[in-house]
Amino acid sequence: MTTLNDSLKQQECDISLIDVIQRILSASKDISFRLQQGALAGILGATEEENVQGETQKKLDVISNDLLKDALKASPYVYGIASEEEDFAVPGNDGGEYLVTYDPLDGSSNIDINVSVGTIFSIMKTTGNSDLAQDFLQAGTNQVAAGYVLYGPSTILVITTGKGVSMWTLDNRIGEFVLTNDKVQIPAQTKEFAINMSNQRFWAEPVQAYVADLLAGEEGPIGKRFNMRWVAAMVAEVHRILTRGGIFMYPWDGREPSKPGKLRLMYEANPMAMLVEQAGGLCRTDSERMLEVAPTEIHQRVPVFLGSKEEVERAVSYK
Ligand SMILES: O=P(O)(O)OC[C@H]1O[C@](O)(COP(=O)(O)O)[C@@H](O)[C@@H]1O
Ligand SMILES: [Mg+2]
Ligand SMILES: [Mg+2]
């Protein structure tokens, strides 16, 4: 049986990177256990707090963030941490070489209704910038590893170190992730889209026109009938797309016009973009390749179009 460590060594990851990945996974196994225990673990419901983005924190947002932060701070190889649930970058260890960003619990509005959620992570190297917040502001092309853990009916790790994408299923009998797909590929074409249709009237004209053409089906200009899905957890949407193709969109909309989008670049869009590209798909903002966006702040938001190559190309061609 190929272990994750063997696989990472075959991908020429050094011991320090493997250590960082394993610490993320040990926290994720703990999160997975608590999710399975649900109400029995006292994890349901909200806290009294809001995060830096003004969103109410769920109890498990805070617990997951602390589990990951404690695990990573204990690694001698982690130089700094940035999280959706931390207002500022968190220092790690002076001798460390890696910067880790994460969304500890993605789709957290799903927790209380017992629907899939996930943990998203991205790993880069420090540039040596003495200002830690600035150190993080590197384009997604600098990621050395990225992935997510999906907490669904099974707990599944999906990871890339830039040499393809593999899926690993947590075997609860042995407490280890077991390789279940080592050649993840997204089909170039699809008949399935994901977008929150309740925002339709707030979208910009090009998104209105594209989605109208999807809905027109075989009678419209695209000439095929589309199905629609919306799980409200990006991890679950990306997992579906990595498994059977599709397009996922969270575009800019006019509800809060000054916000460029809802999803966050450094710990949602970039790690997903690396996975999707490594699996043969595309991930773009409305104007450029996601991985080439120059970040200006840790909690920056971006519009996201990702998935099957030909469909993403079509979506962003509407002007
Ligand atoms: O509730 P909406 O507007 O449909 O947004 C759903 C999107 O928001 C997110 O839940 C944001 O993630 P968090 O739960 O980490 O804040 C995405 O996972 C998902 O795609
Ligand atoms: Mg999220
Ligand atoms: Mg989150």
Image (spheres, grey):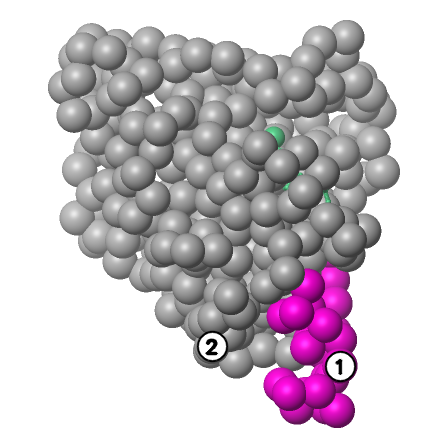
Compared to residue 212, the image places residue 143 above or below, namely above
Where residue 249 sits, quadrant-wise, is: bottom right
Q: Is residue 79 left or right of residue 237?
A: left
Residue pointed to by mark 2: 310
Q: Is residue 226 magenta?
A: yes
Q: Is residue 159 magenta?
A: no
Residue range highlighted in magenta:
208-230
Estimate the x, y position of residue 164 in percent, counting from the top left. 32, 61
Residue drawn where x is 53% and y is 31% of the image = 103
Amino acid type of the residue that numbered disc 1 sits on in the rendered structure = Ala
Estimate the x, y position of residue 291 in percent, counting from the top left. 33, 49
Where residue 23 sits, quadrant-wise, is: top left
- Other-residue count near label 1 (Cα within 10 Å), few / some / many at <14 / 14–19 / ≥20: some
Amino acid type of the residue that numbered disc 2 sits on in the rendered structure = Glu
Estimate the x, y position of residue 61 in percent, counting from the top left. 65, 22
Given this view, does label 1 or label 2 mark the residue nearer the observer?
1
Residue 144 in sight here: no
The tag on residue 216 is 1
Q: Is residue 299 left or right of residue 105?
A: left
Q: Nearer the viewer, residue 289 or 155?
A: 289
Residue drawn where x is 27% and y is 53% of the image = 162
Disc 2 beta carbon < 8 A from ligand 1? no
Element type at mark 1: loop
Disc 1 beta carbon < 8 A from ligand 1? no
CA gap between label 1 and label 2 equals: 18 Å
Q: Is residue 73 left or right of residue 28?
A: left
